[in-house]
Amino acid sequence: MKRCSFILLFVFLTVGMANAQLFKFGVKAGISSSRVKFSQVDLGNNHVAKEGGAITGMHFGLVSRVQLLGFFVQPELYFSSTGGDIKIVDQSTSIEAVKTQKFNKIDIPVLVGWKFGPARIGFGPVASIVISDKAVLEDYTGEKEQFNKATFGYQVGVGLDIWKFGFDLRYEGNLSKLGDGVKVLGQERSFDSRNPQLLASIAYYF
């Protein structure tokens, strides 16, 4: 139900603005750098999980924009792949193994902002629907991590419009947790994991 509501919201905003002044519609694609942020988790058997480095992902989908004077609203709908490295440390030997946690998501940001000539600055909320994830702690705990299927965050960034192209650089932060916890030997181990990212993209408007 939540997934359908988010998608219907995007369609409503797009169709509702179709007759507005300076409405544009297009496609976009880009790359991202994301990481999984969380506190250290004790996995038992002298193993702990720690936050690792960032990984490169990609995104592609639809973008629309309505502009009135110097103000604009920009709803988007796109598929994205994100994640981050997780370090598994054997405390008895100090040996580290790096595992990559990946997520496939549908992101629905709605940015508002101001346009100064070809330049833009904007910010707004983003809803993310996780459609698949790769569990990396299951081999150590025997239980799959408990990830939320829908999360909320925000995006802020700058852009530049040249002819029919739009170039964007944004930061995405989290307002809700990505994960609630993981079971280790039958016991619940809580952790507050989040998935911030930097996004660079290019859009083409028809």
Image (spheres, grey):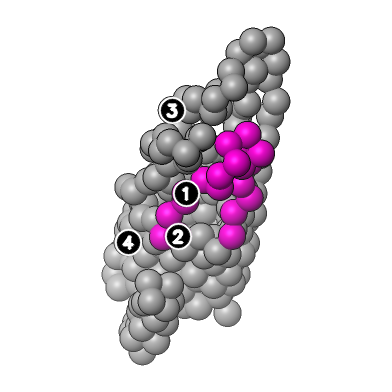
Query: Which tag, 4 or 1, sits closer to the chain's start?
Result: 4
Q: Residues within 10 Å of mark 2 (few under 14, many from 20)?
A: some
Residue 82 visible here: no
Q: CA distance from mark 4 to mark 1?
A: 33 Å
In the image, what residue occupies the spot 58% across and 69% down? 61
Camera-near label (4 vs 1) is 1
**In the rendered structure, which amino acid carries the disc numbered 4?**
Val
Callout 3 amino acid: Ser
What residue is pinned by disc 2? 149
- Mark 1 highlights which residue? 146
Image height of 37 relative to 205, above or below:
above
Asked if one can make out residue 147 in the rendered structure from this viewpoint, the answer is yes
Q: Which residue is mark 4?
A: 112
**Residue marked by disc 3:** 39
* Spatial separation of the CA atoms under disc 2 and disc 3: 20 Å
Q: Which mark is residue 206?
A: none
Q: Residue at x 68, y 29 (%)?
A: 98
Q: Is residue 9 above or below residue 131?
A: below
Q: Secondary structure at mark 2?
A: loop
Which of the two discs, 3 and 4, sits closer to the camera?
Answer: 3
Tag nearer the camera, 2 or 1: 1
Q: Amino acid at mark 1?
A: Gln
Alpha-carbon distance for marks 2 and 1?
9 Å
Mark sitting earlier along the chain (2/3) = 3
Q: Where's the N terminus, which quadrant?
A: bottom left
From the viewer's side, name the closer residue of 132 and 156. Answer: 132
Corner quadrant of residue 187: top left
- For disc 1, the neighbor class at 10 Å (few under 14, some 14 to 19, many from 20) is some
Q: Report the span colored magenta.
A: 132-150
